[in-house]
Image: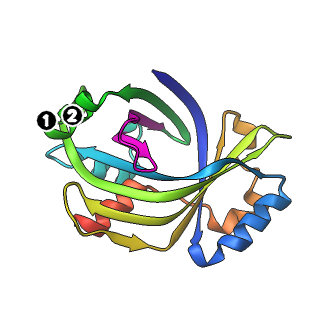
Amino acid sequence: MINLNRFEIKFVDNYSNIKNILKILKDKNFNICFPNRKISSIYFENSDQKIYLETEEGITPRKKIRIRYYNNNLKKINLELKETVSYNRKKSVSNLSSFHFKKIEKFGYWDKKYGLCLPKIIVEYERIYLINNLNNLRVTVDFNLSFGLHGGIFKKKIHDLIIELKTSKLQNVSYLDDVLSSKRRRYSKYLRGFDEVVI
């Protein structure tokens, strides 16, 4: 199991502006550090939709439960539990065997806070990975987002561009504010996906 504790600051734009955003990041000494990947996340929810409601209302602490895999590779699957406490994020990541993946997908995941949670929606997107080695900062840029009900065929595509600054140091959370402050906001892919395909 991997445990991460960090601050995550999000900025939202439209995909049509991706070239300008990448130039801004390059000017701030961010460089691509990893090949682009397609990310697929299956989000879980309980019968009262409590995870969605807590996310919508900004209640902390709150948690998201998801299964994630990359580039459609179902041989390497992770179970991720992500807890939000104000700006701070705590994430635990566990590898799942194919057997356990199918078991959780079919019967659900039991959480101490939310009880039985079943797969609700799937979120897919492409991600660009960048790093600023001078300040030990990472940024991801997500685009080509699509949402669908778990087990369904229909997928809703949107043109949001999500820029996310990740840092373990509180003093670095404002590093991009001088160039992207007008785009800084709360953003949850789960919340957006739920609104698009469930409600």
Magenta-colored stretch includes residue 80: yes
Mark 1 falls on what kind of element? helix
Q: Which residue is mark 1?
A: 107
Up/down of 153 relative to 109, above or below? below
Give me the residue at 26% from left, 34% from top.
101
Q: Is residue 25 left or right of residue 79?
A: right
Residue closest to the eye, 80 or 174: 80
On residue 140, which mark appears?
none
Across and down, in percent, residue 171 comes to 75, 39
Labels 2 & 1 near each other (Cβ < 8 A): yes
Residue segment shown in magenta: 64-84
Magenta-colored stretch includes residue 24: no
Near mark 1 (Cα within 10 A), the count class, few <14, some 14-19 or many ≥20, is few
Give me the residue at 23% from left, 45% from top.
45
Q: Which residue is mark 2?
A: 104
- The color scheme shown is rainbow
Near mark 2 (Cα within 10 A), the count class, few <14, some 14-19 or many ≥20, is some
